[in-house]
Amino acid sequence: MGKGMGKGITADAAVEKYFANLKASTSYILGLLVGQGEFVVHAAMTPLKEDNPDGLMNEDDKDYILDHAEHLNRMVPGGLSVMGMFVVSPSHQTKESHMKMRRTMAAVENRVSEDRLWGFSEEDTNDRVMLHICSNTNKVTCWIMNIKEPSKSSKSATWSYLQWMTAFWPVAVCPMDIDLMFPIKDKTRHGLMQAMKDGMMRWAKKTEASVCLLNNKNLPAKTNLNPPTKASLVWCATEYCNVVADDPCE
């Protein structure tokens, strides 16, 4: 474990309530954190295995955990992703359990990266959050791991909660109808999935190269947006997207 205080991680108050319910259990619970940057908006416990519903979940169940991460990452809205993991256990975290957590986090990152359609932006970070909660003492330990340099020591970080953290986040909704044609060379299930992924990758690159207009204006990337009282999508295509909002800019 590394030394030195790193950056602070802020979680929505709803996450605190979620953890409070989990701490009532005496079992070892493992799950994933969803958010953006330094903000956690959702925590999702990895479901207990059907063949052992009352048993313990631990990092050794790696394949099961990775499947959960893959499905969760596909379900979250755009702009959010699996940004870390958490463990709730009756005992304090040991050096051995911390290293297991690091290995699991690295494996989770590799799995969710396989489905990534979009390129990395300036807002993307290499930091991944690892949180341990002792259900007996309520002690919370938070660590930051650089996923691009997994051999380096983790850095400790502060963990705090904020009421209604996401209540005023502006949300842009853009429904799309996708009609793609792609060749299938291998008719096995794996070949079909790979062909679909390749087709989606080509579509994603075109979408990334598109231009998004707010109130018919092409605004700089660093423009701050005020939460609109009304917002509606008026037209969207691969090369062009226009959102109408009330007073979108400061």
Image: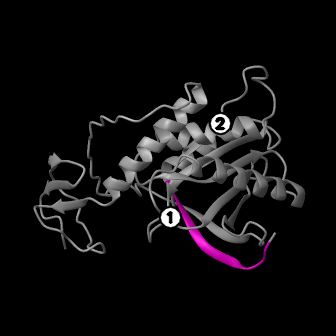
Q: Nearer the viewer, residue 220 or 2?
A: 220
Q: In the rendered image, which quarter is residue 211 located in? A: bottom left
81, above or below 190, in the image: below
Residue 132 is at least partly visible in this image: no
- Which quadrant would the N terminus be assigned to in this image? bottom right
Q: In front: 124, or 210?
A: 210
* Residue under label 2: 67
Name the dominant secondary structure of the magenta segment: strand
Query: Which label sits on residue 156?
Result: none
What distance separates the C-alpha of mark 1 from that of mark 2?
23 Å
Q: Which residues are magenta?
A: 2-12
Q: Residue at x 27, y 52 (%)?
A: 172
Residue 117 image position (x, y, % from top left): 46, 51
Going by the picture, which residue comes out furthest to the top? 51
Position of residue 77 relative to residue 40, above or below, is above
Residue 101 locus on image (x, y percent): 77, 53
Q: Residue at x 71, y 56 (%)?
A: 106
